[in-house]
Every structure is written in C-alpha cells, then in structure tokens.
Amino acid sequence: MAEFNLTDEEYLALDDAEFRARFRERIHHTLEIQIYAAAYRNKTLSPNQADTCKRLSKLWRHRGLPTDAHDYVLGQQISAWADALSRGEKIDLSPYAPKKVSPEEEESFFRIIHERRSVREFTSQRVSDELIDKILDSGNWAAHSCNLQSIRYLVIREETSPGLFLGSDIPGGPVHLVILQDTRVYKANPFNPVRNRLLDAGAAAQNIALAVHAAGLEGVWLTFNDKIVERLRTRFNLPEYVTPVTYVDVGYGDQTPYPVLRPKVAEVVLGRG
Ligand SMILES: Cc1cc2nc3c(=O)[nH]c(=O)nc-3n(C[C@H](O)[C@H](O)[C@H](O)COP(=O)(O)O)c2cc1C
C-alpha cells in the first residue's frame, strides 16, 4: 500500500519519532503477528517475510539510531525468528512464558482494582523519584494501538513548580503526572482510527492509577482546562506535536473515601451472543 511504501530517501527524511514509529508499525503488521501464526498454527511464512524489517533496520543504522533501543532489539529478534520459521525450523518461546499467577497474586490483583479510590487529600510525605518512575513504567506497559508508542510524560512537583494547575479541582498535587502524546507517531499508520489515540492515553492512565495504589500511594485522575494546558506548554516549551491529554495527581493519601459503588455486571451487559 502506498501509505507504507516509502523510498529509502523518504524514510531518511523523516524525523526520528516518525521513523521509529514506522519501524515499530511495520514490524507489528508484517512480522510479529505472522510469526506467532507460523509458530503455533503452522501457517507458512514467505522466505522474504523479514525483508521489510531488514530494510528498515539498515536504514535505522544508517541514521545512527541506537542499536540497543527497545524497538530495534525487538525487530532483530522477531526477524531472526521469522527467518528460522521460513527455513522450516521450530522456535522456542518457552523462556518468555509468563510466570503462572498464584491464587494469592490473583487475589491481590483484584483487590487492588476494587480498593483503588480517587483520593484527593495528601500528607506532606515526599514521593521518591524511584517510585514515580516505577509508576510511569507501568504506564509504558499498557497496550498501545499498532505498537506506535505515543505516550510521553511530565512529572511536576507542586513544591517545585507551584500554581500550574490552578483552576483544577485539586490544584495542589503534590505530584502531578501528566500524560502527553507525541502525535507524530500516528503518521506511521493513517488507517489507525483517530479514537485509538485517546484510548492509548487512557490505557496508560489507567495502568498508572492502579500502579499508584499498588505502590502504597494514592491518587486521582483529573481534568485539564485550557489555561492549564497553556501553562504547561509554556513552562515546558512543548512543541505543537506534543499534546497534553490527561493527568493523575499522586501522593501519600490522607483520607479514606467511601467506595463509589458500581453497578452489578448483569446491569451493564446489554447483550450476550
Ligand atoms: C477522565 C477522568 C477525569 C476525571 N476528572 C476528575 C476531576 O476533574 N476532578 C475530580 O475530583 N475527579 C475526577 N475524576 C475522578 C472521578 O470522579 C472518579 O474516578 C469517579 O467518581 C469514581 O470514583 P473512584 O475513582 O473513587 O472509584 C476523573 C476521572 C476520570 C477517569
């Protein structure tokens, strides 16, 4: 398809963000899905299956991008497996099998979901940078449409940058985790529905909201107004292609809200086929 068939010159003229997004998208759609179908369902792979990945990997190196980057490493692994499968060899994915979830872990997981609350009062205890990074990493591990990886963050401590969130329900933080998107990545697949962009940010935010509670902190997912967005753009000199989408305030909780009760599943399932 023309949208995906760029010449080498066109690939080299792209900015790094779009080139890397195209690299991830092409691997996702030309290799990743196919190799699992070949490994587990005996689907035949073409001997040229990894050609796009190899061509883009060559362009990656030509651009001088880091060869230890997560997307490049994934591409090399998947392309090696595609070559093995197209030679008729078996590949061993068993080292990557997730550890079986124990009954206790399962219980904890669902308890964290049920006991997460929006907490809007916080103590003065400082949240460490390490804990913040651990929480943001959970956001990175959310599902993302076409593996485009649009999510970016701002970490704002109210004590360091006071007043940016004036006008929000909880202006005082203490730590504001802002979820941004680098919208350049979406040029890599014009067929990706626009609604996926918001869903990508929502998936990251939900992982973050849960990770906050699992990490012993509390937080609340909050709403921007345009003035806050403008203040963030100015304070952090955000380019126009970076969009602030949503944010979660985080700290050590200082209140116990009554659970906002939820409807029963039977009340919300509109049909079962
Ligand atoms: C997209 C989104 C925006 C929200 N905005 C606000 C907000 O501006 N102010 C606020 O106090 N809570 C906000 N919340 C939190 C909701 O009010 C809260 O999640 C809901 O009442 C359910 O309560 P719970 O989170 O304790 O289960 C928001 C939540 C979401 C998902």
Image (cartoon, helix red, strand yellow):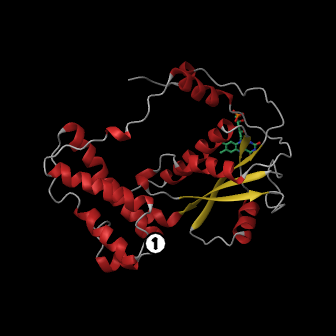
The residue pinned by badge 1 equals 16
Count neighbours of disc 1 (C-alpha within 10 A) and say few if under 14, some if 14 to 19, many if 20 or more. some
Residue at 62% across, 23% down: 263
Q: Position of residue 39 (x, y in %)?
A: 23, 41
Q: Quadrant of residue 114?
A: top right
Q: Is residue 7 above or below residue 146?
A: below
Q: Position of residue 219 (x, y in %)?
A: 73, 42
Q: How many marks?
A: 1
| Amino acid type, mark 1 | Asp
Residue 273 appears in the figure: yes
Residue 123 sits in quarter: top right
Quadrant in which the C terminus is drawn: top left
Q: Where in the figure is residue 242, as x and y percent of width and height?
A: 59, 66
Please tell me whether residue 52 is drawn above or below residue 95 in the rendered image: below
Q: Considering the image in quadrants, where does the N terminus appear? A: bottom left
Q: Residue furthest right?
A: 124
Camera-side residue: 77 or 60? Answer: 77
Q: Quadrant of ligand 1?
A: top right
Q: Position of residue 79 (x, y in %)?
A: 27, 57
Q: Is residue 228 left or right of residue 142?
A: right
Q: Nearer the viewer, residue 166 or 61?
A: 61
Q: Secondary structure at mark 1?
A: helix
Question: Is residue 190 something that shows in the picture?
Answer: no
Q: Residue at x 79, y 61 (%)?
A: 164
- Using residue 4 as the reference point, say whether residue 118 is left or right of it: right
Residue at (79, 38) in percent of width and height: 253
